[in-house]
Amino acid sequence: MSTVSVWRICTATYSERIFNGEGGLHFKGRWHPKGVPIVYTSDSRALAALEILANTKGAATLRDRIWVMARADIPGDLIQMPARYPEDWRDHPPPDSTRAFGLAWIKAGESPALRVPSAVILGEFNYLLNPLHPDFAKIKLHPPQPFAFDARF
């Protein structure tokens, strides 16, 4: 399998730590409970932007922050692609079943990357990265570049 490029957007404040998973220690997400270092990435720049929009409250938040975007290149053999996900994976707010699913993946330690479906755009995928996995070092991390949301948002 070839390399998969994924994208992550964050505020410039965290640009030096964009791939360290620190956010998961402080906040729970669809695919992890609070206290778990994890990095959410998307399979396109557009999906990464839509994921931010779906999880940001108010346009002022977008305008009042400086944003960056970074790419990571994951060797395909490092990506776990489950055949099934919890049936309620798209529910909002995210259900405990999806958090348990992600936590089980982290604890199993079988891969540094997990492909999961995007709740924002059906048919698109996000990739969870485990920065503590020994093979995480095999993922090529690119430096963040400036990113700006269109003023219409």
Image (cartoon, grey):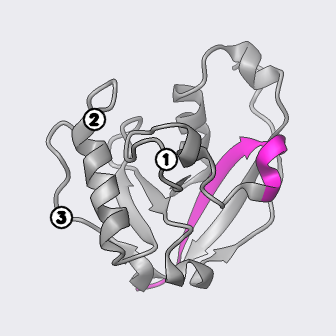
Where residue 116 appears, x then y in whole percent?
35, 55
Tell me: 8 left or right of 92.
Answer: right
Above or below, comparing residue 62 to residue 120 in the picture: above
Inter-mark Cα distance, 2 to 3? 16 Å
Q: Amino acid at mark 3?
A: Ala
Residue that numbered label 3 is attached to: 83
Q: Which mark is residue 35?
A: 1
Where residue 92 appears, x then y in whole percent?
32, 24
> Which residue in the rendered view is the most extreme toward the front?
35
Residue 89 seen in this snapshot: no
5 drawn magenta: yes
Tell me: 83 left or right of 45.
Answer: left
Which mark's residue is nearer the viewer, 3 or 1? 1
- The magenta stretch spans which residues? 1-16
Inter-mark Cα distance, 2 to 1? 22 Å
Q: Amino acid at mark 1?
A: Gly
Query: Tag 1 or tag 3, which sits nearer the N-term?
Result: 1
Above or below, comparing residue 87 to residue 57 in the picture: below
